[in-house]
Image (cartoon, helix red, strand yellow):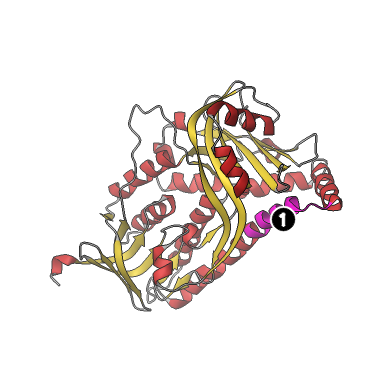
Amino acid sequence: MTEKRLHKADVAIVGAGLVGLAAALAFARMGYAVTLVDGQPPQMLGPQSDDWDQRIYAISPNNMAWLKDLGVWQTLPAVRIATIEAMHIWGDATVAPLALQADAVNATALGFVLEERALKQALLAQVQANGVDIFYEPCVSVHTASIQSQLILSSGVTIIGDLLLAADGANSWVRSQLGIAVDKKPYNQTAIVANFDAESPHQHIARQWFTQEVDGHCGIMAWLPMPGNKISIVWSVSTQQAASLLELDTKTFSQQVMAVGNAALGNFDLITPPASFPLALTTARQITKGSTALIGDAAHRIHPMAGQGVNLGFRDVIDLVSVLKGKQYYQSLNDEGLLRHYAKSRKSDLFDMTTLTHGLYHLFESHSEHIKKIRNQGLTAVNQSLVKKILVSHAVKM
């Protein structure tokens, strides 16, 4: 092996999605030598592009502030961002929604909605500006030990890293190669995503409906506000029903989406073709091994009903950075105690979110009339109590 084919890094990261890019930037700004590896370069958004990405994310206020600290948020085009100032949630038998307002806790927003592509481009620009080395080619081998990790790329380049971060998604190649087991609970649901132009203004309100579908299963429809009168939907339904919905023509599909929301925003015009992905609760049984740590979907994937997938991933990075900032001078980046601390710090956050999403799914999946009555009475009761203010406060602080 020649010297040129050996590449040394303090932190090596596999996966240049949003979480991987954010991790690369965060560690580079701490002064570490960072190397980022991904199988292919990201799709770029043209300067005059007026099309909209199918993948839309709601970023929490705390994560927005963190991205701003990283020098990313302020570089995003404001015309591609919408704020969520309120959220309205309907049960399957409630008339008045549970209304959560940002101003109830003197906040300006519950979240910020933008395209994956726009955020990825802004992150990548900062990653490049901060001197991160990037390899766009597949990995063919990985080995991790307490001392360091080793990645071999398809070109034969070997990357040696003190700390290896697996940010390569729910079907993580790194996780699989390292033999880390995964607990997976399929929801037997598929999420359909699409973007629409709405006839009426959304008033910066995110809307969500829990429904009992025609096949008896739980359905969850979410409308996220986008710039202008645009909205993005995430419609979680049984996999069988999703297949039927995806076969509909554009007009009929739009009418179905409108009907679930009682045509609250008038007529819809589809502006991106619907896409779909299967839903499952996926949790890695360990998120550290040797000198490797899992972050983002490689570590966990939850139901999208709470819109917390990428936010959880960002919080993985925030916690890992916080732990390593507190290390003693004699400790290495892959110190076993530090990585154990990281794993422990993420356990509580992940438990809270999986309990919420998994619990709500099964609550609304139940066919019991008694449970149905309780869940809808519960939404009504929360709408009239101080609990609502606590929920808003929690949402803002995520």
Where residue 189 appears, as percent x and y from the top left, is 61, 51
Based on the picture, tell me whether residue 364 belongs to the magenta stretch. yes
Residue at image mark 1: 362
User: Number of callouts in the render?
Assistant: 1
Residue 264 sits in which quadrant?
top right
SS majority, magenta: helix
Where residue 10 appears, as percent x and y from the top left, is 31, 66
Asked if residue 27 can be seen in this view, the reply is yes
Residue 309 lies left or right of residue 379; in this view the side is left
User: Is the residue 41 above or below the residue 177 in the image?
Assistant: above
Towards the viewer: 209 or 145: 209
For mark 1, does the 10 Å Cα neighbourhood hold few (<14), some (14 to 19), or many (20 or more) residues? few
Q: Quadrant of the image for the N terminus?
A: bottom left
Residue 357 lies left or right of residue 75; in this view the side is right
Tag 1's secondary structure? helix
Residue 294 sits in which quadrant?
bottom left
Where residue 351 appears, as percent x and y from the top left, is 63, 63
Where residue 392 appears, as percent x and y from the top left, is 69, 44
Based on the picture, tell me whether residue 28 belongs to the magenta stretch. no
Q: Specify start and end residues of the magenta stretch as a single range.
A: 354-368
User: Is the residue 121 above or below the residue 197 in the image?
Assistant: below
What residue lies at 54% left-to-right and 71% top-to-bottom?
285
Asked if residue 236 can be seen in this view, the reply is no
Towards the viewer: 136 or 245: 245
